Structure formats: C-alpha cells, structure tokens
Amino acid sequence: MDSDASSEKKRKSLLFFAPERSNLQILEAYDIYLHHLTHSDLFDITIMAPNGSPFAAEAKSMGYRMYPMSDFARKLLQRTPQLWPILTATRRYRFDIALSHEGYACRGLSQIARRVVGVCHDDNFEGFAAANRILILNSSTAELAEEFYEEEIPVDILPYPYVSQFSDITPLDDDPDKALTIGASGPFMEEDGLGTFIHAAQLVHEGHPEVKFVIAGKGPLEHDLKELSDHIAPFIDFVGPLDAEEMAEQVDLFCLPAHHAPFSFALCQVMDAGLACLSTCASGPMDILKGGMVAPLVPISDAFLLAVKLQELIEDRSQIARIKKSCFERIREEDFSADIFESRLIKLLLMKPKTASNLTS
C-alpha cells in the first residue's frame, strides 16, 4: 500500500456543524449523516450545535464529543469569520474536515478545518462559496450550482438514502363502482402546495363527485387551509397526521403538490407502502420519479393541469395499477441504497480539494 493510500486510512478529525433548523426533513438528515459517519468508523467526530438544541442534546446523550455554540458564536460565524478562531479559542486547522449543513458557516469553518464540505439541504446553494465541495440533493439544482460557481467548486449529487419498510403492494380494487380516494399531505406551511391541491379537488369534484379527497398532516397554516376548503371544497376530509401505512390503507392515489421539494421522504414512504403517486415537477421529485418515467409529474402551482391529470387517472384505473407497481419498484433501486450513500459520502469527504472530478458511481 502506498503512503497516500495509507494516510487516507488514518482516522480523520471531523467537525459536524449542525445549526438549529425548523425543517423536520433536514433534522432527520442530520441523524442520517451522523449515523453513516459513525458507522464508517473512519472519523473522530466533534459536533458543533447550538446550546439547548434537540439534536445537540441527543448527540450528547449518545456520547459524542460536543462543541456547544452560543448565539454569540453563531453571529461571529456570519459576520466576522476571520476572527472566529481567536474569539472562540479554537486552534486554526484543528480539524481535518468540517461538514457544514449551512452555507453561512463555511467561511468561519474554513479557519479551523483544512477543508470544508457543505451539504445543501434546501436548494439554496449560493451561500456555500467558501466550501471546498458542495453536496446537493438533486440533479437540476446541481446543474444550477455548477453554472453559478463556474465549476470552480466541485458539486456532487448525493440524495438521502431510503430504507424500505414494506414487502407487499396492496392491489388496487378494480371494481369500477367503488369510489377512489385521492390523498395529499404536507407540513401545512408556505410552498407545500396544499392550496393548489384543494383547488384541483374542486375542479375534479365537478366531473367526479363520487371521488373522495383527504389531506393529512398539521402545521401553522391548518386554519387557513381548512377555511379555504370549507369555502370551495367542503367535501375534503382533513384526517390529521398519518404515517405511510395509514395513508396506504385510506388512499388509492397520493399527490405531492409541493412548490419546493429538494427531496421528499414523504414521497419515498408512500411509494414504499405501495401507493400510486403523482407529483409536481419540484427538483427532488423530478429525480425520485425519473422525470415522469415512474409516475406523472405536473407543473408547480397549476391546479387546472393537476385536475386534468387526476381526472385522466380516475377514468383509467389500469394506469393507477401500473404506477403503483412502478413506484414500489423504483424506491428499491440502488439510487436509494444506504450502503451506496455511505460509500459515496466517505469518498467525497476524503477527496482532496484539488480533485475536482465528480463521482458517478
């Protein structure tokens, strides 16, 4: 074994920067990254997270080395990163690698880590200019990032992994007299598209009053969405939070109407549960559904075209059965493999900054 290969086998010191986030999907991603980094057994991990954050408390209880971050330190990272090592008494280049889950921190982290790898969870890649490498969840955003940085910073596509939980597809009832149920879910927040779904349901109901509609979830805009539904689509049933198994028991066709979705665990989960799906052409679902080859995609925020596609599927149940099978098979492909995710993550973290070629496997 040559010396370079031998040195890469040595354990690296890694700083895991995890700022507080309200997005539950990103918080789940913290756990995914931390699990695979720990499982690899290649890194001495220190976690930097805000004092009192749930992630910091969980990590501390699991025995990880902690570097608590005060609000003052966070502001230093944003405003005067060059002073950060001095004012926080952190030795320059103390860490081999910093894995940053937020763009604004990269400049400050570059003062205490030899290389910084940024993870862009929300498609907002502009803040990662100080990173040595950027990991992005989907191909369309990666292309935009490569153009934005003019290929000066290596950009790699690394979607979250997904581990299947189900083994069977519940067959679609082919009785034409049995009414179909169409469902959607979301966090009841801006850009979840549930308002668009309500308007589409109103249009579909005019031609197919027998079709049932349900919306699962809860969140800050729940009152507004229920008020909209009461006004134009009072037949929609708000059923509260449902897991994938419960959704599959109640729904024949799942719709993801999101305006913005760099990735979607919810979509993966219902595909795994054997539901037929359709989605807007948000960046994450575009990759998950292979640009519409697996399941239909519709334009973002277009209630009319969503209603047209729903009506087409209602009137041809064989399409729904085919989509169920395609979705179930797709989520089991290697694109979602946890083992491949871990292997690629490790390779990208250990890759020297001067190696700018993206991995394709």
Image: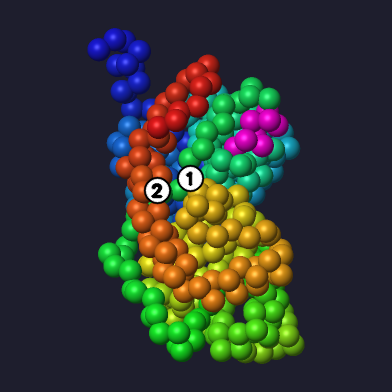
Q: Residues within 10 Å of mark 2 (few under 14, many from 20)?
A: many
x 35%, y 13%: residue: 4
Q: Residue furthest left?
A: 1
Residue 281 vs residue 341, the one in the foreground: 281
Residue 307 vs residue 60, the one in the foreground: 307
Residue 210 vs residue 35, the one in the foreground: 210
x 41%, y 69%: residue: 321
Q: Is residue 88 visible?
A: no
> Where 261 sits versus 121, above or below?
below
Q: Is residue 40 visible?
A: yes
Q: Quadrant of the image for the C terminus? A: top left
Q: Secondary structure at mark 1?
A: loop
Query: Residue 327: x and y, percent?
Result: 42, 60
Measure the alpha-carbon separation of dots 2 and 1.
8 Å
> What is the magenta range?
142-149
Residue 331 vs residue 344, the one in the foreground: 331
Asked if residue 5 lies left or right of residue 112, the reply is left
Labelled disc at residue 159 = 1
Amino acid type of disc 2?
Answer: Phe
Q: Which residue is mark 2?
A: 336
x 54%, y 71%: residue: 313
Q: Residues within 10 Å of mark 1 (few under 14, many from 20)?
A: many
Asked whether the beta carbons under mark 2 and mark 1 sit within 8 Å of each other, the answer is: yes
x 35%, y 21%: residue: 8
> Where 149 sits versus 232, above or below?
above
Amino acid type of disc 1?
Answer: Pro
